Image: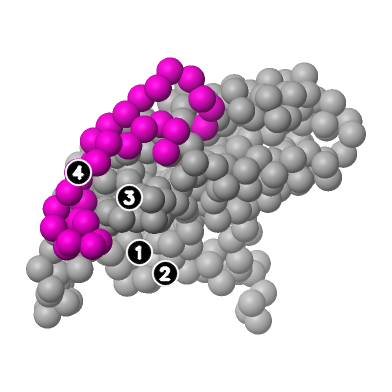
């Protein structure tokens, strides 16, 4: 056993291990030995008069679009990147405290693995690391979300065999081909859950002259959203009539949503094709045999797996419980940090100071 392994073993007696999937839409927290204990929207409500945080998570999300002038419900992560450092720090601190309710009290701060998008820059890595340390972490390890997702669904990432994963989150979609413990080819695009919600808002505004909020758009997407035609579905939505300014309700069908999100879905399909086109032939052969794995909330979009299969002619598998795959992966990394050390983004000391 090396000195570092002995030191880690000693420290583990005095501190807890936490895995965090830091998402644009939701943040999940995994506690070693307990599983996923927190799953909250990445939203923070702030009182602008006092600068105090009023609420975090689901309570804050319920406030979106419903707050008085002096309280603002903000999403501190935009497209997978920290846009408000202090608010992110407050959110992480709150979530780690919530996780603390499920852990024994330890003398030292927790060891934390955090999942970030694959396109993350050195500056953004440092921001995540600093925010997590300021929230109370003793040690912080950063892992790319598609890699964590692949580990979470037990793909053989260390073997000389190619695996392909598409992680459709709230702010970004990560498409990655993995082999021998590393990402061979990847692409990160800003087409994900939030973009689809905005597409729905724009479509309903243009076609029906009704203004709806983000929460309504999300609900419509879940209720009747589909990317392939099939049995018709419809739902009623309420919003503000842009002409009269008064409330109005209309019926929205699945074909409306298909038309609204069609362009963004095409971009996602195109990105998947581009990654396949630059994948080495031997690995491509593995992917054709083993299929493509979908994780993240976007994996649940009705008909997406069938559409991908139709366009790419490669088997598509939706992971079991795709929403929690990345957080589960962070947890598995914590179980055996030495085994997975090679998949982590280098520590702050290794990041060039001129980045």
Residue 341 position in % (x across, y down): 62, 45
Q: Label for residue 208?
A: 3
Residue, disc 1: 76
In terms of sequence position, does the residue under pointer 1 or pointer 4 come before the other?
1
Residue, disc 4: 249
Helix, strand or loop at mark 4: strand
Q: In front here: 58 or 193?
A: 193
Span shown in magenta: 227-256
**Residue ID at (83%, 32%):** 283
Are there few (<14), some (14-19), or many (20+) residues within 10 Å of tag 1? Answer: many
Task: State the scheme by which the image is colored.
Answer: one colour
Work out how far the residue at label 4 is from the one at label 3, CA to CA, in angstroms.
10 Å
Q: Quadrant of residue 162?
A: top right
Q: Is residue 243 above or below residue 200?
A: below
Are there few (<14), some (14-19), or many (20+) residues within 10 Å of tag 4? Answer: few
Q: Quadrant of residue 84?
A: bottom left
Which of pointers 1 and 4 indicates the residue nearer the eye? 4
Work out how far the residue at label 4 is from the one at label 2, CA to CA, in angstroms.
35 Å
**Residue ID at (13%, 63%):** 67
**Residue ID at (73%, 24%):** 314
In terms of sequence position, does the residue under pointer 2 or pointer 3 come before the other?
2
**Residue ID at (61%, 28%):** 307
Are there few (<14), some (14-19), or many (20+) residues within 10 Å of tag 3? Answer: some
In terms of sequence position, does the residue under pointer 4 or pointer 3 come before the other?
3
Q: Is residue 81 above or below residue 203?
A: below
Residue, disc 2: 83
């Amino acid at each position: 056993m090396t000195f570092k392994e002995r030191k880690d073993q000693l420290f583990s007696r005095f501190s807890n291990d936490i895995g965090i999937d830091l998402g644009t839409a939701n943040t999940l927290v995994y506690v070693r030995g307990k599983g996923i204990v927190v799953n909250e929207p990445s939203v923070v409500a702030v009182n602008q008069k006092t600068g105090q945080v009023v609420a975090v998570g689901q309570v804050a999300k319920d406030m979106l679009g419903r707050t008085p002038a002096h309280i603002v419900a903000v999403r501190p992560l935009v497209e997978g990147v920290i846009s408000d450092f202090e608010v992110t720090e407050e959110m992480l601190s709150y979530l780690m405290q919530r996780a603390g309710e499920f852990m024994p009290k330890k003398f030292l701060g927790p060891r934390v693995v955090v999942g970030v998008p694959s396109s993350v820059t050195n500056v953004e890595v440092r921001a995540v690391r600093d925010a997590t340390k300021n929230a109370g972490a003793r040690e912080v390890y950063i892992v790319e979300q598609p890699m964590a997702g692949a580990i979470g669904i037990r793909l053989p990432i260390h073997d000389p065999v190619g695996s392909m994963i598409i992680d459709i989150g709230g702010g970004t979609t990560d498409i990655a081909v993995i082999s021998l413990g590393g990402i061979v080819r990847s692409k990160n695009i800003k087409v994900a859950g939030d973009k689809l919600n905005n597409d729905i808002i724009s479509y309903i505004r243009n076609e029906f002259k009704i203004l709806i909020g983000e929460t309504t758009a999300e609900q419509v997407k879940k209720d009747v959203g589909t990317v392939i035609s099939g049995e018709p579905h419809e739902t009623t939505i309420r919003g503000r009539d842009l002409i009269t300014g008064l409330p109005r309700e209309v019926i929205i069908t699945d074909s409306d949503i298909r038309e609204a999100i069609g362009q963004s879905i095409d971009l996602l399909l195109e990105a998947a094709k581009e990654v396949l086109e630059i994948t080495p032939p031997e690995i491509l052969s593995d992917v054709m045999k083993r299929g493509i794995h979908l994780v993240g909330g976007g994996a649940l979009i009705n008909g997406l797996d069938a559409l991908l299969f139709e366009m790419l002619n490669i088997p598509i598998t939706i992971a079991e419980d795709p929403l929690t795959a990345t957080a589960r992966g962070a947890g598995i990394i914590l179980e055996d940090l030495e085994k997975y050390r090679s998949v982590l983004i280098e520590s702050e000391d290794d990041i060039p100071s001129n980045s």
